[in-house]
Image (spheres, helix red, strand yellow):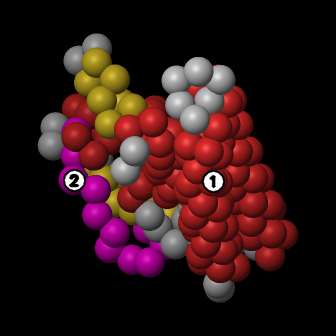
Amino acid sequence: MDERLKIYDDKMKKTYEFLESDYLGIRAGRANPHVLDKVKVDYYGTPTPVAQVGNVTIPEARMIQIAPWEKSLIKAIEKAIMSSDIGITPSNDGSVIRLVFPELTEERRKSLVKDVKKKAEESKVAVRNIRRDGNEAFKKLSKGEISEDEGKELSDKLQKMTDKYIKDIDKLMEEKSKEILTV
């Protein structure tokens, strides 16, 4: 791939990967350990991901169980989950913490699908902005460093790249929406 196109491809790829990781945090009624990815526990003064202070398992379809490696961390993990935005109240029995995911209502599912579509739209706008920046850079180049035809060819390749990422984002959005709406 042309070096001049590679930087725009990398930016578009990062946009796609960010959306992908963002979608992992959206819960679809089933327990998904990725909802804890952004939850940080105060571990001896250092914000540490939950997965690094205990064993995270899924004993049932709608439950996450966290077994801290140190019993003294139970309160800290509970506090971190309570102050996060995952919207689930943890319960503990002194040795493990359980997060029970309630069944999603039809209304909540539709609301989550709206969020998914909004995030996808934001990502598509970001990809189009990257394309615009690339086209502007190629126009400047074609005023001196490269021929007009070469500038046009780079813009065409950039458009194909943009179309590919937009299609990938749409596919990702459809998969996540389907997952959320599946009861």
Is the stretch drawn in magenta largely helix, strand or loop? strand
Q: Is residue 1 above or below residue 72?
A: below
Please name the amino acid that badge 2 sits on. Answer: Asn
Residue 106 in picture, x, y percent from top left: 80, 76
Residue occupying image coordinates x 23% and y 18%: 44
User: Do we see residue 175 in this rendering?
Assistant: yes
What is the C-alpha distance between the residues marked 2 and 1? 49 Å
Please name the amino acid that badge 1 sits on. Answer: Asp
Dot 2 surroundings within 10 Å: few (below 14), some, or many (20 or more)? few
Quick one: 105 or 163, which is closer to the camera?
Answer: 163
**Number of on-image labels:** 2
The residue furthest right is 107
Residue 69 in picture, x, y percent from top left: 15, 43
Q: Secondary structure at mark 2?
A: strand
Residue 42 location, quadrant: top left
Identify the mark at residue 55; answer none if there is no mark. Answer: 2
Magenta segment: does it hold 157? no
Residue denoted by label 1: 156
The residue furthest bottom is 183
Magenta segment: does it hold 56? yes
Residue occupying image coordinates x 38% and y 38%: 3
Residue occupying image coordinates x 69% and y 51%: 124
Residue 129 in picture, x, y percent from top left: 70, 37
Q: Is residue 74 left or right of residue 121?
A: left
